Image: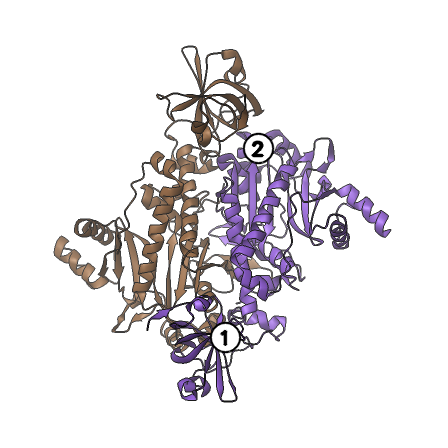
Chain colours: A brown, B purple
């Protein structure tokens, strides 16, 4: 009789075979003389059933409780009424690492009952919960399909420095570092570097940490997150960038469904369809629409409020049956200095936000590409040119029209999965007060 | 006649067609009434040839010099004596972004003549040089094939926090951050997090920046680099880890050859064969061998010197015809506190270095996995347990035997390509004094 080492996700294809699995004791229950053991490995769970207490006495005695690491050998048996259609019968268990203490948060029930603070304090253990780790498996799948979509379109991955000599876009909201005898900062975004690299590779992307010292204590902010950045050259205008973003969103959604069907099912994720063309509305028209439909006069405001975005999300769903909506043409005043204006109406920008179910998910646009335009823009913004000297070299020596966007990985997951707090989409979040685990 | 927008790397398959390309003016030369224009786009270069000065007058007059961004249309013609076997004839050029200033470093000759400092100061432009950017295209391919190798073996990608509450392994050599009203640090490695995540996913990897405040001014040190980290559970000992590292090295080398044949050819890279089993030697035997072969008594030294490693590299080549050699069993005293000792001889560790052509390229090993062992190890190392409290939770609640390794991306490229300075394998290096570009 063969005895193979397999994963929990492979059990169903080994019915009638004797197999060995390794993992963690997720739960052990005794029900009328029958013992049910759920084993969790790195990929899923499987139930083992024994009618012989002696075989599993070590797990029942408290010698090796929940979260003990074990090796289990038994017979795979088809069992239509079992959660996954199969069970392991007559399991023999060997303890590899016994655990005798009860975990600080209960992680072997369907739902985690602990409050947010306790969950975050004990994320080291709580992230083992099947529903929690499903979020992070989806994070991995999102990064993977983001990269695959772009690799297939001639993009090259870069890794730009995170320690920088000056703040990227604004002097505020940046973390200071003691860098030998100099002061340095943590990069707020790879913006300047991805633009510079358009001059090298034409099409680049980066997946990496960004750092924001914003002192916000909200459910939608953390101070370190993962940004999926894209930048590419030879665009017509921001609509070229929006078309690429549509491809990327579509690639990510397909990737999640392809790589993580079990995780999406477990989390009961409502997957959106990405329309062949995502509808768009001009900033101006959006404000007019809100006034007409809701009687609230936001015309003349320099930006959209969260309520405005929610209204627009509802409208996009009603009007186009789309979970996605582009808002284009934000006023220049609210956009960073490198933003390209609309040539026909320079008070408005060739930029966009992508709303997903009524909340901003992605920001992007066309950037300035002429050296002279940067000189004027920096002067207009009241920035000295010196801290931008090396950035400016890219434009001084030839840059094509270009643009890009940045997707916040955690925000994407939060909105897709309907999580109540961005921290629950972050492996080990950093906020105003939290630096551990 | 069709007129298609293509890349330089696609020209050869469009002989006899009229095509359009976009990119940068790499060089323009006049040779006996014939004008040779080399166009560089994000992927390669192509030569266009014109016998009509009037067509290219804008490029010849200085109105649009080297690095100008242009669109070029012409007829693809087979030309066996041309560098790539094809040329563009009768090119028409439209200038998109003119450049009139001469770049600060000459980047359109086969070799860059400027000194290292000038090259690094002007990396924004110098990274456009075909030989420079080939290095970074290889970096992207190395990351890609690293991930693909591991994705195919059940690994999950993680992104661990880079802002941490305490130094990972040693209090020295860590950058301090002003984190609101707390002091925090930049992560020296994802070591603790990748171990913690073995408790969640069993097999994890990360590609991300690490930060070392070592005040070293050498050709082999920078203060921020890209680490490709692996960690996985249910190992037998460090030999299981070494076998996985062999798979990864083999996957990377195959990936470089598959994705970047042109870049490897341009850089004249001598690609190593990764043997089916990489030979290994015990630290102890290595010192004995050096004494026997070279008469230098390094026996009793706690570590190998660079000279020792070079001698061992020569020996591995002579003895096994291998560019790779594992040295195993380093003394515990020189390894971090979480290192697993050799059960048979606890003064030596279940750890290894991978030497590549006589230089250390990768470090790894088996880690402690029992909670009690961590308590003892921290006490022995004189560390207080409090800063390690959340890390220790992973071990308190069940961890399997596990291990892993970290590959420095830039060091891999430096050694593979025979670069004289690690900075030349780094997109925008950070060192003791350099924070820009």
Q: Which mark is residue B79?
A: 1
Could you classify mark 1 by the number of other residues whose Cα lies within 10 Å: few (under 14), some (14-19), or many (20 or more)? Answer: few
Residue drawn at point x = 43 percent, y = 32 percent: A129
Residue drawn at point x = 37 percent, y = 54 percent: A407
Camera-side residue of B118 and A232: A232
Residue drawn at point x = 26 percent, y = 65 percent: A329
Q: Relative to A223, does residue B45 appear above or below in the rendering?
A: below
Residue A7: image x %, image y %? 49, 31
Q: Nearer the viewer, mark 1 or mark 2?
A: 1
Circle 2 is placed at which residue position? B234
Camera-side residue of B299 and A224: B299
Q: Relative to A279, does residue A121 appear above or below in the rendering?
A: above
User: In this view of the protein, can residue B221 be seen by the observer?
Assistant: no
Tell me if A157 is positioned left or right of A314 in this view: right
**Gap between marks 1 and 2, in whole Å?**
58 Å
Q: At numbered mark 1, what does the secondary structure look like: helix, strand or loop?
A: loop
Camera-side residue of A87 and B193: A87
For the residues beneath circles 1 and 2, the answer to whether they share a chain is yes
Q: Relative to A91, does residue B316 appear above or below in the rendering?
A: below
Residue A13: image x %, image y %? 44, 29
Precedes in sequence: disc 1 or disc 2: 1
Q: Which quarter of the picture shows residue B216?
A: bottom right
User: In this view of the protein, can residue A239 be seen by the observer?
Assistant: yes
Q: Chain of mark 1?
A: B
In the rendered image, the quadrant that contains the N terminus of chain A is: top right
Residue B18: image x %, image y %? 37, 73
Camera-side residue of B232 and B192: B232
Residue B206: image x %, image y %? 52, 47
Q: Relative to B301, does residue A45 appear above or below in the rendering?
A: above
Q: At numbered mark 2, what does the secondary structure look like: helix, strand or loop?
A: loop
Q: Which quarter of the picture shows residue B175?
A: bottom right
């Amino acid at each position: 009789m063969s005895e193979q080492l397999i994963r929990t996700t492979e059990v169903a294809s080994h019915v009638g075979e004797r197999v060995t699995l390794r993992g963690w004791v997720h739960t052990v229950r005794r029900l009328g003389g029958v013992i049910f053991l759920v084993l969790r490995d790195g990929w899923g769970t499987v139930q083992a059933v024994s009618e012989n207490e002696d075989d599993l006495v070590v797990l029942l005695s408290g010698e090796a409780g929940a979260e003990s690491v074990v090796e289990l050998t038994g017979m795979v048996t088809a069992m239509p009424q079992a959660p996954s259609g199969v069970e392991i019968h007559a399991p023999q268990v060997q303890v590899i690492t016994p655990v005798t203490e009860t975990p600080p948060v209960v992680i072997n029930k369907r739902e985690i009952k602990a409050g947010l603070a306790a969950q975050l304090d004990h994320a080291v253990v709580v992230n083992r919960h099947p529903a929690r780790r499903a979020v992070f498996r989806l994070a991995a799948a999102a990064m993977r399909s983001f990269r695959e979509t772009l690799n297939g379109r001639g993009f090259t991955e870069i890794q730009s420095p995170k320690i920088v000599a000056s703040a990227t876009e604004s002097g505020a909201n940046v973390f200071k570092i003691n860098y030998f005898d100099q002061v340095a900062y943590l990069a707020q975004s790879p913006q300047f570097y991805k633009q510079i690299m358009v001059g090298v590779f034409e099409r680049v992307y980066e997946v990496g940490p960004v750092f924001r010292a914003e002192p916000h204590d909200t459910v939608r902010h953390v101070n370190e997150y993962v940004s999926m950045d894209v930048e590419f050259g030879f665009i017509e205008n921001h609509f070229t960038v929006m078309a690429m973003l549509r491809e990327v969103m579509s690639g990510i959604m397909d990737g999640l469904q392809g790589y993580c069907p079990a995780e999406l099912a477990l989390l009961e994720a409502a997957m959106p369809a990405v329309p062949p063309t995502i509808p768009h509305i001009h900033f101006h028209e959006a404000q007019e629409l809100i006034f007409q439909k809701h009687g609230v006069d936001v015309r003349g405001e320099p930006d959209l409020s969260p309520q405005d975005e929610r209204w627009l999300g509802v409208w996009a769903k009603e009007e186009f049956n789309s979970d996605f909506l582009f808002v284009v043409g934000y006023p220049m005043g609210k956009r960073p200095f490198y933003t390209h204006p609309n040539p026909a109406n320079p008070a408005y920008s060739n930029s966009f936000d992508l709303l997903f179910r009524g909340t901003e998910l992605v920001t992007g646009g066309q950037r300035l590409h002429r050296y002279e335009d940067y000189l004027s823009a920096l002067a207009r913004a009241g920035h000295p040119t010196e801290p931008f000297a090396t950035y400016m070299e890219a434009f001084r020596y030839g840059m094509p029209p270009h643009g890009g966007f940045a997707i916040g990985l955690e925000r994407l997951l939060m909105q897709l999965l309907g999580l109540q707090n961005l921290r629950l989409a972050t492996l080990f979040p950093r906020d105003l007060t939290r630096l551990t685990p």
